[in-house]
Amino acid sequence: MSTGRDETAAGMIAPFSDRAEAGRLLAGRLAGMGLVDPVILALPRGGVPVGAEIADALRAPLDLVIVRKIGAPTDPEVAVAAIAEGMARPQRSEPWRLERAGADDDYVERAAAAQLQEIARRRRTYLQGRAPLPLVGRTAVVVDDGVATGATMRAALGVVRRRGPARVVVALPVAPRDVVDALQGDVDELVCLRQPVFFRAVGDWYEDFHQVSDDEVVSLLRSRQGGG
């Protein structure tokens, strides 16, 4: 597996200027991996600008895997679970993380029901009736702008695996080293450019980490339609 452990600590190297730069750097790594018939699957919203750059560089189609994190009751930015389209039940984080966050089963289930409604809205808004691209026998490259706990990415990978790709590759600009290690068993290969031991937030690794809008996602997808 390719992990990119050469860039590890904040302060040693500059952050990415923005998501587009992160995507171009990831594309440089992926280009040498001999990916056969790749499909780029970005997690909206923040993963889409990253995935768009990879799709352009690899001349691959860009599609989405729509996942929503379930934040802790007192800190919505800290994921304690996640749910993706097509999942009946949410993917939970480790029991100790749930307990520390005060997130019991009832809380997770209620939050998951609300997030499924948001997933349906995003599919209508972003893809406007377009069916998901086929993955059977292809290389699925799952992309986000970074990972903090891994809950959202694990939910995405579960959905992607069920669609029958021959190979699953995760491409990330940044994630904590322990989370990268934990994800290795879920994929065929994983590329992560920054793997800090001490990690606070994905946004710390970007100069421009603006909130990606629905309109930006729609524009990036529309300009890359036609592949598949």
Image: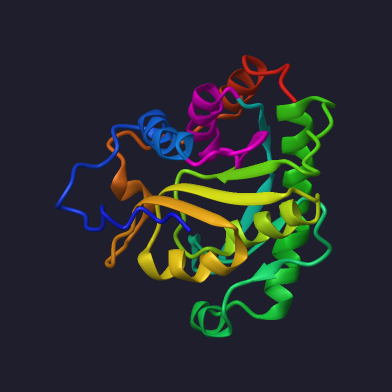
Q: Nearer the viewer, residue 103 or 141?
A: 141
- Residue furthest to the left in view is 12
Q: Is residue 88 left or right of residue 205?
A: right
Is residue 70 in view? Answer: no
State yes or no: residue 48 in magenta.
yes
- Quarter occupied by residue 156: bottom right
Q: Residue at x 57, y 38 (%)?
A: 45
Q: Is residue 150 left or right of residue 65?
A: left
Q: Nearer the viewer, residue 164 or 81?
A: 164
Q: Position of residue 165 (x, y in %)?
A: 74, 48
Total labels: the figure holds: 0
Q: Position of residue 120 (x, y in %)?
A: 79, 42
- Quarter occupied by residue 104: bottom right
Q: Nearer the viewer, residue 56 or 149?
A: 56
| In the rendered image, the vertical position of residue 83 relative to residue 47, given as above or below | below
Q: Nearer the viewer, residue 20 or 93?
A: 20
Colour pattern? rainbow
Q: Quadrant of the C terminus?
A: top right
Q: Is residue 45 left or right of residue 226?
A: left
- Residue furthest to the front in view is 34
Q: Residue at x 50, y 32 (%)?
A: 212
State yes or no: residue 119 in magenta.
no
- Quarter occupied by residue 125: top right
| In the rendered image, the vertical position of residue 169 relative to residue 218, given as above or below | below
Q: Position of residue 62 (x, y in %)?
A: 64, 29
Q: Residue at x 79, y 25 (%)?
A: 128
Q: Position of residue 152 (x, y in %)?
A: 59, 58
Is residue 139 in view? Answer: yes
Q: Which residues are magenta?
A: 33-59
